[in-house]
Image (cartoon, rainbow, N blue to C red):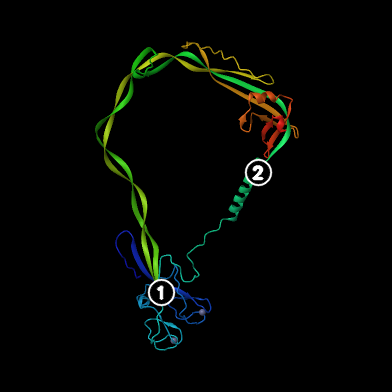
Amino acid sequence: MADKKTKGSDEIKVIEEIVEGYWICPNCNAKNRGAEQQCDACGAIRGEDVQFHCDGDAPVITDEAELAKAKAGPDWICQFCGNTSPAASEKCTGCGSARGSGKQRAVKEIPPGGAQPQSGPAKTNVPPQPMPAAFKIGCGVIALLFFVLMFLSSRETPEKIEIIDNQWTRIIERQEYKTVEEKAWENEVPQAAVKLSSSREIRDYKKIPDGFEEVEETYTEKVKIGEDKVEDGKIDLGNGRFQVKYKMVPKYKEEQRTRMVRREKFRKEPIYAEKVTYNIDRWIDIAPVELKGTQDEPKWPDSGAEKNTPPKVGDVSEKARKETYLVKVRRLSDGKEYEVKEMRNKELTFEQFMKLRKGTQWEAIFSGLGDLREIKLDPAAK
Ligand SMILES: [Zn+2]
Ligand SMILES: [Zn+2]
């Protein structure tokens, strides 16, 4: 039986175990059992300076006689030969001298996760993993690409271009004043409406209490599924054994369960209202008119707009005017063609379009990535 004491019966239990540690021979580096007085490999005595170590897999002592030795107290150090002897021994196990005033080894408390005096062969602390080399290289390549793109994008070079085509489009969006049929609830009918008909329709529902019912309901419950044994400090007993304290931390799982619950029932009762069908005059979007051209001067199409005050059915009004200008360009150095609708994120204006006539040549600014940024229209800037 292990030396297990259970303290407290609530959530976190604490248990204790006596385990045997080990020591490393300072003479030959051999690993020896904690209780051993002399090195198994070279016979050197376990001197005063030798430290005891204890790992997670240290053997648990269950034998009653061995437990008694572990609890007998720390070893004592012979003042004549430096050997350490068990507490129960009245004579030095090394040279046979009487115990006399031989001093005891220290009994040391080691806090949870506390550092061992010296590193043993089996360390529990894992050093942080370095980033994989491939990942680092990947990041480097992406960063480099980013800077190359930034550099190319920010570099601008002037080049000669020729305008090879002009295209313009002008559109007018329109509305017509029309009589339309609509439906609305009686209290929401506009004043100008001409009522045609009405009918009783369900407008909404009322919830009316209608007794109780038993329904199945799902809920989650925390269920204990075991315990994790977590080390919570230990004591170096000064004789090669350690007293290790563990916390038994309960582990839980969430479980879906069902239960029957009583719930109030409701029934739906319709609320009726009059729905009115009516005629009303409104501005309604109609087909836009559009005009396109190339080298000719851009013009607006005839919108046919005609408005009376107040408006009459059949009136047409303009809602919005939209114009787009596009020039096709050839770069003289390599014959590459571009379509230009905007310069530096601003759409081409009528004035710019009228200067950029087919057959004219200009200086244009290209980015390092090959985009046409701007055509230099100001001769002073050349
Ligand atoms: Zn040795
Ligand atoms: Zn001795």
Q: Earlier in the sequence, mark 2 or mark 1?
A: 2
Is disc 1 placed on a helix, strand or loop?
strand
The residue type indicated by label 1 comes to Arg
Q: Residue at x 28, y 42 (%)?
A: 260
Coordinates of residue 324 in the picture (x, y in percent): 62, 24
Coordinates of residue 327 in the picture (x, y in percent): 68, 27
Coordinates of residue 332 in the picture (x, y in percent): 75, 32
Q: Are marks 2 and 1 in contact (CB under 8 Å)?
A: no
Q: Quadrant of residue 261?
A: top left
Query: Left or right of 191: which side holds 307?
Result: right
Q: Residue at x 69, y 35 (%)?
A: 365
Residue lying furthest left in this view?
Answer: 211
Q: Residues within 10 Å of mark 2 (few under 14, many from 20)?
A: some
Q: Quadrant of the C terminus?
A: top right
The residue type indicated by label 2 comes to Phe
Q: Residues within 10 Å of mark 1 (few under 14, many from 20)?
A: many
Is disc 2 placed on a helix, strand or loop?
helix
- In the displayed structure, would residue 317 be above or below residue 119? above
Coordinates of residue 63 in the picture (x, y in percent): 36, 74
Q: Which residue is mark 2?
A: 151
Q: Quadrant of the N terminus?
A: bottom left
Q: Which residue is mark 1?
A: 241
